[in-house]
Structure formats: C-alpha cells, structure tokens
Amino acid sequence: MKKSVLFIILIAVIVVLGLLLDWQKLLPGLQGGQSDKDPLPTSQAESFEDCVAEGNPVMESYPRQCRTVDGRLFTENVGNELEKTNLIRLESPRPGGVVTSPLTITGEARGYWFFEASFPVYVVNWDGLIIGEGIATAQDEWMTEDFVPFVAEITFEKPTLYPERGALILQKDNPSGLPEHDDALEVPIRFE
C-alpha cells in the first residue's frame, strides 16, 4: 500500500511540474522575459505632436491627451492658460494655433489686468526672443473687476530658425514695477 501511495504522489508531482512548465511557456512575462513571437509594439513619439502624427488615439479633453501603443501619455501644451482662466481669456489665436503677420489678438481680461485701458503683448520665437510687440486695448470700460474685451494687432517677421514654434505673451500692465504685481498669460503658437 505504501508503494501505491508513493507512486500516486510521484505521478501528481510530475503532472504539477509539467503544468508549471507549460504555463511558463504560455505566459513568458512571468519571469520578466519577452516572447520572440509577440513583441510588444513600441512608439518613437517624444511629444504630443509626434504621438498624434503616429496615428495614436487622442482623448478629447482639454488639454487634449494622446496615448502611444506602448502606454505613454502625452498632453498637449496649452501654456499657462488653465492657470490664468479667471484673470484673462484668449479667444484668438488659441494655444497651438497657426498664426501669420499681422496677427490680430482678441479676448477678455479682468479690469485690473489693464492700466490706462491697455497692456503689452509680445510674440516670441522658440528661444524667447521678441519678434513682435504691441498694445492690447480695452474695448469697454476697464476700471472694473469684471472681464473687459480687448483687441491687439502685432506685426512680426517669421523666424527662420525653428520657424514652427513660438509663443504669445499677454503681460499684465504693472506701472508700479513691483515684481509681486507681475503676471502674464503665455501660450504656444505656430508660425505659418
């Protein structure tokens, strides 16, 4: 009887070992290995724009997000627009928008963003060099804490180095010159 129990235990151990070996072949990732038959897809994307160009799905959130086939997530650069939405709102151009010279800028800002019904606006290249500047003017009574519509027009020369990237900076007018009163909305733009 001891021989038959020992024989049954031996058979059970062999079956369990066989199942474990077969299971590891089916799931090569258990040991950190990768099956040669089914390599995971990879992506060469290094930015939101690259991710979209590869044809990956884009989530329609704001800001938009793109997920690569290997699981990395890229978020569209909208500058600091979300942080400043209670102070200044840009209608045109939108972050990431394509612009040409002359550039007309429209939006609305709180009355305290202005001084004497205006504030400075800059167009900069990829390196932060100012290539155009102008003044945004209030289109209504600016001595209020409410939002006041504004408009500005800037002419600039399209940069030759990295001509596709730049930024639009709408700076709070600060006649005191004190740094604690400085503020700005900065959004990325692309040059046509």
Image (spheres, grey):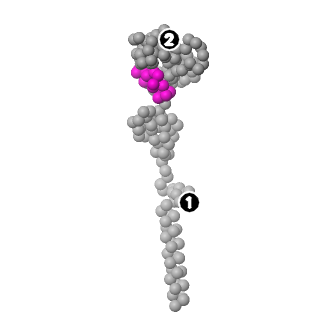
Up the image or down, 124 lies above or below 44; here it is above
- The structure residue drawn at horizontal position 41% and vertical position 38%, both measured from the top left corner, is 59
The residue pinned by badge 1 equals 31
How far apart are the two marked residues, 2 and 1, measured between alpha carbons?
A: 66 Å
> Is residue 68 visible from the viewing direction of this image?
yes
Pick the front one: 167 or 109: 109
Q: Which mark is residue 158?
A: none
Most extreme residue toward the top is 116
Q: Nearer the viewer, mark 2 or mark 1?
A: 2
Residue 55, x across and y down, in percent: 42, 39
- The structure residue drawn at horizontal position 51% and vertical position 40%, both measured from the top left corner, is 44
- The structure residue drawn at horizontal position 49% and vertical position 20%, both measured from the top left corner, is 168
Does the magenta run of residues contain 89? yes
Magenta span: 80-95
> Is residue 100 visible from the viewing direction of this image?
no
Residue 160, x across and y down, in percent: 53, 19
Give amino acid for label 1. Gln
Q: Which mark is residue 115?
A: 2
Give amino acid for label 2. Phe
Pick the front one: 166 or 61: 61
Most extreme residue toward the front is 144
Pick the front one: 171 or 57: 171
Q: Secondary structure at mark 1?
A: helix
Does the magenta run of residues contain 86? yes
Pick the front one: 111 or 128: 111
Residue 20, x across and y down, in percent: 51, 68
* Label 2 neighbour load within 10 Å: few <14, some 14-19, many 20+: some
Q: Quadrant of the C terminus?
A: top left
Up the image or down, 10 lies above or below 124; here it is below
- Image mark count: 2
| Mark 2 or mark 1, earlier in chain | 1
